[in-house]
Amino acid sequence: MSQTRDGGGETGMESLAFSNVALLFGAAFVVAGVATSLVASRFGAPLLFLFLCLGMLAGQDGPGGIVFNDYRVAYIVGSLALAVILFDGGLRTRSSSFRGVLAPALMLSTIGVVVTAGITGAVATLILDLRLVEGLLVGAIVASTDAAAVFFLMRSKGVQLRRRVANAIEIESATNDPVAVFLTLVLVELVLAPRATGWVEVSLILGQQALVGAAIGVTGGLALAATLNRVTLPQGLHPLLVVAAAVLIFALASVLQGSGFLAAYLAGLILGNRPVRAFPTILSFHDATTWLSQIVMFLVLGLLVTPSTLVAYALPAMALAVFLIVVGRPVSVWLCLTPFGFSRREKTFVSWVGLRGAVSIFLAAIPTLADLPNAETYFNVAFFVVLVSLLVQGWTVAWAAGRLGLKVRDTGPEIKRLEIDLPGQLELELVGYPVAPSSPVLAGAVFPSWMRTVMIVRGGEVLTPEAAGELAVGDYVYVLAPPARVGRLDRLFATLDGASAFGVGTFSFGGDAAIEDVCTLYGLHVPADLKGLTVAAGFAERFEDRVDIGDRIAIEPAYLLATAIRDDQVAKAVVEFEEDGREGAGGIVGRVGDKLRGFLVERRAARAAAGKAAPGRRPEAPAE
Amino acid sequence: MALVELLSPDAIAPALKVGGKKQALQELASHAAGLTGLDQQAIFETLLQRERLGSTGVGEGIAIPHGKLARLDRLFGFVARLEKPIDFDAIDGTPVDVLFLLLAPEGAGADHLKALARVARVLRRPGVLDRLRAAHDAAAIYAVLIENSEPAAA
């Protein structure tokens, strides 16, 4: 099949061969990247870190031996991937989650970034022996909390945090990139041409970036939603249109001197919060696209770095990373969040989740593209800082959330949900659920008023809800529900992990009982944000409008567990106590110990029963 | 802590006759007052106030009324079996016939919780309820509870 044309034969064949090899390697990388996720889920290692490592292995110092030094290509790939990831982040953010956290999140993403960049930059100046401007540039490069890494962590680790904390971090990470990008660009210019740039000028440019980005993002999002709903496209083209439009919005904003990152996020946010046709398909397609973007971006960045030169920067970069994690970020978090009444634990956690990621590496490529002196330093230091952050913070985030008591649920329930888009209308979606054993629906949970049961499939037979009567395990229930609320139905049909909630040993409180009364009763310390609230209001505070059956509020060593919901409010909650972790993993030692104790108690009891003729035996005061 | 530490063999009423929830709490308060020397009315008020927050009927015919009393110096347990089950607004709606009263000193803190958890755990053990209901006198009830009690891992 060779098309040998006059003279050009050899080079033509060569480039054909090259593209085949390139395809082979490219595809092999993506396959390897996907396979890496298995390793990651087994060892809990941060997946993004593994992607980076995979890229380094394939690179010039690793067995792959691929020499890739094209910063320009890396920059384009990175931009593209970030646009998709940020758009996806917006798409999955409910606008209700902004309530109450918009101001603190915006503080973090503006002043927070500047403060982090300033402190870290000053230290970088000392550690790396740079001029102040150059040091600050290093600070700016590593100052932003990475949205890709944070979104990824929140959604893949299955950690559900208190809404306020989770929302603040998500919004911060989504909106702080423009500030970091901007700081970096200004500083690059200052290094190149050290002239007195007035603060007025600087803030004008920043304002322009934000305004243009926001305007294009909002208009783009609205236009996209309108287009999707009006124009009838062939099946399967809707999601493609959305991805293309996301990149278009990003690029348009960037070309017009606006912040493309902000525009992409806002466009996603708007689209995700409007009734849109084919939304389930769009979401699932976006899932795949976002994954691909993550893999490709981190692989390319891993390829770009030269590990052998990286080693030379290891010590100072490590020092900088530690400083950033332990001092730089916490200081700016404390400054930004203290006025908003965040607790010490919350601030500690927000500090800890300040993951650095692709944006930093990507920004570190700018000095090279701009031919700055010491360009290599910026890139390698930033790369190292990101590695440390991904590894240390990424690996410990779930643990930290648990330690600081900010985790509200372990994992979302494993549930298969079938979403079917209904052509012709947008307000409702058809969803199918299998009924799981010991799920709230079987325990007589009341269906929310906004949900309508359409049919029940039992043993291959389609039944109307009336004909089906009581639900049974294995039934498939098909319901109509507004797309935005569908997620809340999951808990109704899933196996409730705290199935004992309806068993013996739990005390039930009405939604109108004061949390303070409950706490006083058991000598529990009332969490600061729940003082003066009723049980229902407390759950509303912690979970906003998304409280579900099975949600819990930890009040060590007990917790409140919502067991009944009426009109989106907790109608009943039980107090459960954890009895010294006895039910937990005791291990062999624990079990042997239990047996021994059991034996001793039996003997003691036997003696007590035998000696009951002498009843005056005073129960000892609890010795602890 | 084991149940022996908070339940003495004489703190058991094997066949209490009551007509309703309030009367059951009255009876428990009176028995507890006799054994602890505290004011009956104070105990009753404490229990009643607790029930107002939510019923202590935890299901399967069991109720664990409880509360804190300033003048108490130790955890105090009292078990009553009712001749006839009464309505207790329990979590599962089942009428209650086994009551485990647990009073704690004001500063009991976590011990109060641990004791409650222990009581619930003992009553939840398979077979315990059936044997309690089949037991005819205080000694038998005491034996069933103590046999099935075990200390929590410290």
Image (cartoon, coloured by chain):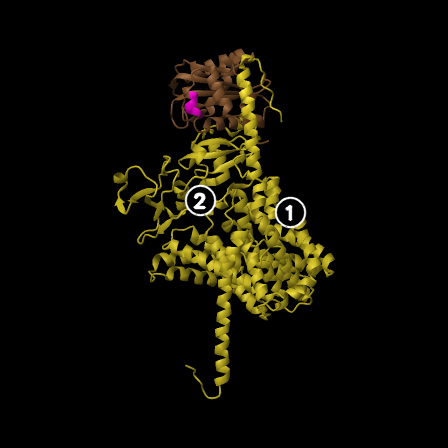
Chain colours: A yellow, B brown
Residue under disc 2 on the same chain as residue under disc 1: yes
Q: Name the residue tied to disc 2.
A: A413
Which element is circle 1 on? helix
Look at 32% across and 39% down and name the residue there: A471
List x then y, in percent, for residue A491: 42, 41
| Residue A216 forms part of the magenta stretch | no
In the rendered image, the quadrant that contains the C terminus of chain A is top right
Residue A78, position in %: x, y? 54, 63
Numbered disc 2: what chain?
A: A
Q: Give the percent coordinates (x, y) of residue A139.
A: 66, 56
**Front label number (2 vs 1):** 2
The answer to the question of whether label 2 and label 1 lie on touching residues, with beta carbons closer than 8 A, is no
Across and down, in percent, residue A125 comes to 72, 58
Q: Is residue B50 above or below residue A282?
A: above
Q: Which residue is mark 1?
A: A330
Labels 2 and 1: the sequence-earlier one: 1
Outermost residue on the bottom side: it is A6
- The residue type indicated by label 1 comes to Pro
**Which sits in the foreground, A143 or A205?**
A143
- Magenta stretch containing residue B131, yes or no? yes
Q: Quadrant of the N terminus of chain A?
A: bottom left
Q: Which residues are magenta?
A: B128-132
Mark 2: which secondary structure? loop
Residue at 54% across / 39% down in the picture?
Answer: A585
Residue A216 makes an appearance in the image? no
Q: Amino acid at mark 2?
A: Pro
Q: Chain of mark 1?
A: A
Position of B152 with respect to A561 (left or right) is right
Q: Nearer the viewer, residue A315 or A187?
A: A315
Classify mark 2: residues with Cα within 10 Å, few (<14), some (14-19) or many (20+): some
Whole-angstrom CA distance, mark 2 to mark 1, is 33 Å
Residue, x 50% and y 57% (percent of image)?
A: A85
